[in-house]
Amino acid sequence: MKVIIEADGGSRGNPGVAGSGTVLFDATHTTILRRLAYIVGTATNNVAEYHALLNGLTAARELGATEVDVLMDSKLVVEQMSGRWKIKHPDMKELALTCRDIASGFASITYTWIPRKQNARADELANKAMDALAQGAQPGFLDLGGDSHPEPATKKDDCAGDQHATAPKTWNGATTDATRFLLLRHGQTPMSAARQYSGLSDPSLSELGRYQAERAAQYLTSRGGIDVIVSSPLKRCQETASAAAQALGMSDIRTLDDLREMDFGQWDGLTFSQAHESDPELHQQWLADPKVAPPGGESLVQAHRRIKRVREELQREYGEATILVVSHVTPIKSILRQALDASAGMFHRMHLDLASLSIAEFYSDGPTCVRLVNDTSYLR
């Protein structure tokens, strides 16, 4: 007997009011066998996702399933349960071990990531559970009355995602979900403290930089919903990304060379004044013309093309997902410039603090949106 599981979890506050929803279908994905809304209590979004999965696997076992296909919009859970990503968060690890124990009893099981709009049924149940908890209900399964009995999937259910897809989802006219980039600049290094150009030079974080990375990581944990972490290969970003991964319970950091800082060539290690004094005319040309490169270095135009290429590759690969990008001033400004469709002049007109967070969204059907620039509220 084959069972298809749609599962979703949510948290309002992360950690905060948490609930999960699970829908079980027959092998044709047309008849609903069971609907489960579970009040988790106070937990993170990822823990709620695991509860949704656990409840689905338990119900599938009770139904006598031998084959199970799990569909979830949490890339984190899908990758971890598929064995491609490690699990460090203790609460998630305990739930995952229980899920794997149950899963081992099936003849076959698959885990597949689906876009959020295709998981509307489970999401609705998770929200019912969170609503109930907010109104004073205790943790446990929510009584759905007759809703939990087997029934055909109605036309309304079959089109749950399409109903949202046929009308604009946001004010910008997009009809798809975004690839959301959380753009985190690395923490302080001795070179940034000295206000030196730091391109391909590779200093580690300072003590303050490590503190900034930890504070940013705590804030990202409270936000939740991150599907993947990508980082520049340079130490200051790798150390900042590691702090975030540890706090989020994510073991894998994808390193992308094209997320490195702009190459300042012979100016690397110099202050603004020192670079200007070394060649006032060239330095002034560099500030005025994005096609001009520092001696032995890279122009803003060259850097922008490189970063645009890697942003497009990430969008194609991950689609509707939230990607934490840990990088430097120039790459982050480049992605914001792409989202704003702005001129190269913005590179010298925008300030980004150390360990600051910006957010840009790119939709597959064209629209873009910048939702946040240079947030450092979590550092205060």
Image (cartoon, grey):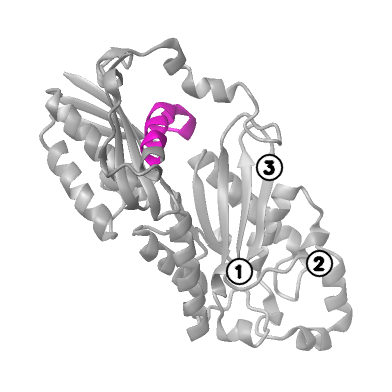
Whether residue 121 appears in magenta in the rendering, the answer is yes
Is 225 above or below relative to 346? above
What are the residue bounds of the magenta stretch? 113-130
Residue type at mark 1 is Thr
State which tag comes first along the sequence, 1 or 2. 2
Residue type at mark 2 is Val
In which quadrant of the rendered image does the C terminus lie?
Answer: bottom right
Residue where numbered disc 3 is placed: 368
Residue type at mark 3 is Thr
> Badge 2: how crowded within 10 Å, few (<14), some, or many (20+)?
some
In which quadrant of the rendered image does the N terminus lie?
Answer: top left
Instruction: Please identify the residue farthest to the right as the structure is shown.
Output: 281
Camera-side mark, 2 or 3? 3
Q: Which mark is residue 276?
A: none
Q: Residue at x 76, y 63 (%)?
A: 347
3D distance between C-alphas at marks 2 and 3: 28 Å
Find out whether the residues at labels 1 and 2 contact each other: C-beta distance under 8 Å: no
Is 275 above or below relative to 264? below
Estimate the x, y position of residue 5 in percent, counting from the top left: 29, 28
3D distance between C-alphas at marks 1 and 2: 32 Å
3D distance between C-alphas at marks 1 and 3: 23 Å
